[in-house]
Image (tube, coloured by chain):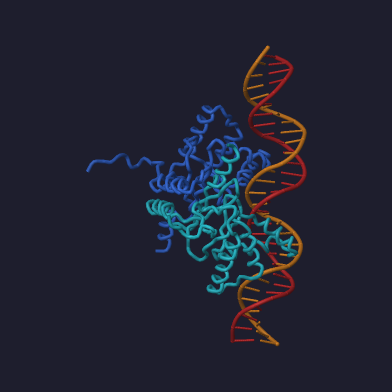
Chain colours: A blue, B cyan, C red, D orange
DNA sequence: ACAACAAATGTTATAATATAACGTAACATA
DNA sequence: TATGTTACGTTATATTATAACATTTGTTGT
């Protein structure tokens, strides 16, 4: 049986949408920040030092993070910030599609593919706290279809599914026996 | 051509899910409150005077209403209420499926069919402020299907589509042309 | 380089939403 | 009617977000 590629190379593609605990997260961060930089350059908007740092803090992991958590982080780093500082950065990042707001958590999470006008859908694990962004065309077209039938003109979508991800379910089974 | 039923009888069934401005709203209220009462009796939980009144206030129209708006209403009625009062009633109503919370608005809206374990989906019109609850099985099965494929165990769903309803689009066209 | 304007950030105060903690009253049941 | 439970009252405070205005930083034209 031939080798099917080098299995020792950790992939950042997560077949179940949730990153494993041991994935190379630095690659996620580098990729996201890199894309953000080129995207802002291309659009002629300024990813300032502050905005860059806030985005980086949001990308600390795959968990949605609250505005005041970010504020605290900045403060720990010696940046004497107040709420408007962080909310303005969040607004910029939201406007430019670099992050998403999770309404059910009042929290913010990084977006991997800025700029695309994508209908974000989130699966959010209550156990590990991670949020997986997807763009399932079936979900999207089911919604668009319904909107069309009732003549509703869509402007924004909030699709947030909470529950337990496959990884955490497995861990819970392991723990129980 | 034969008559196709009495068209002078106003129906509370709204083909596009959004109630028309002139619908007989008292029927919505009576129906909802009636169902709530029997549902609570059946389940052996107490729809107290306060809870009943809060539910009634929420059903004042089809617009999601904020906790502090309800509080103000109660206060105007001479009930010296403070936030915990209203939030406890809201919690009760939420727990018993008599209302839903609209996460994207931090607001609460009445539910027409309590008790059913239904996956609520909302279309929310930014023009008239009304929210239409639906249960589109295609949307729901698209989400369930995706969850199954990634092994995600669903606990709760937030599906809130914002935009403009057909009625309001028509009004906007009338106004312009 | 400099003036003039625009964009971003700093700063103070406050709004809006929600909960903790503990005391009192109402209700249910034996 | 004693007893326990459920609901409600009350005070204080937590959490999330924005308004308004001052200052700094960056950009552009000259």
From the top left corner, tell me how far across and down residue A122 is, in percent.
48, 48
From the top left corner, tell me how far across and down residue A44 is, in percent.
56, 27
Q: Is residue B61 above or below residue C25?
A: above
From the top left corner, tell me how far across and down residue B68 is, in percent.
68, 56
Give the camera-side residue of B168 and B4. B4
Give the camera-side residue of A117 and B59. B59
Residue at 40% of width from left, 42% of height from top? A13
- With B44 as the anchor, is D29 left or right in this view? right
Residue at 53% of width from left, 37% of height from top? A98
Residue at 43% of width from left, 61% of height from top? A175
From the top left corner, tell me how far across and down residue D11 is, in percent.
76, 62
**Residue C25, located in which quarter of the rendered image?**
bottom right
Q: Residue furthest front?
A: B1
- With B37 as the anchor, is B154 left or right in this view? left
Give the camera-side residue of A156 and B154. A156
Q: Is residue A126 visible?
A: no
Q: Is residue B14 visible?
A: yes
- With D15 as the anchor, is A133 left or right in this view? left
């Amino acid at each position: 049986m031939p080798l099917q590629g080098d299995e020792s190379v950790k992939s950042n593609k997560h077949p179940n949408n949730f990153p494993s605990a041991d994935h190379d997260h630095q690659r996620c961060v580098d990729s996201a920040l890199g894309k953000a930089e080129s995207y802002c350059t291309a659009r002629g908007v300024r990813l300032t030092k502050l905005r860059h740092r806030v985005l980086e803090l949001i990308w600390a992991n795959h968990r949605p993070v609250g505005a005041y958590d970010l504020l605290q982080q900045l403060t720990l780093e010696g940046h004497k910030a107040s709420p408007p500082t962080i909310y303005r950065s969040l607004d910029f990042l939201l406007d430019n599609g670099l992050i998403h707001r999770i309404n059910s958590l009042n929290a913010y999470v990084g977006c991997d593919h800025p700029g695309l006008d994508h209908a974000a859908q989130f699966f959010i694990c209550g156990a590990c706290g991670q949020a997986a962004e997807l763009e399932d065309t079936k979900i999207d077209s089911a919604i668009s279809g319904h909107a069309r039938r009732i003549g509703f003109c869509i402007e924004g979508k909030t699709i947030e599914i909470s529950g337990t991800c496959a990884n955490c379910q497995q861990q819970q089974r392991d723990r129980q026996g």
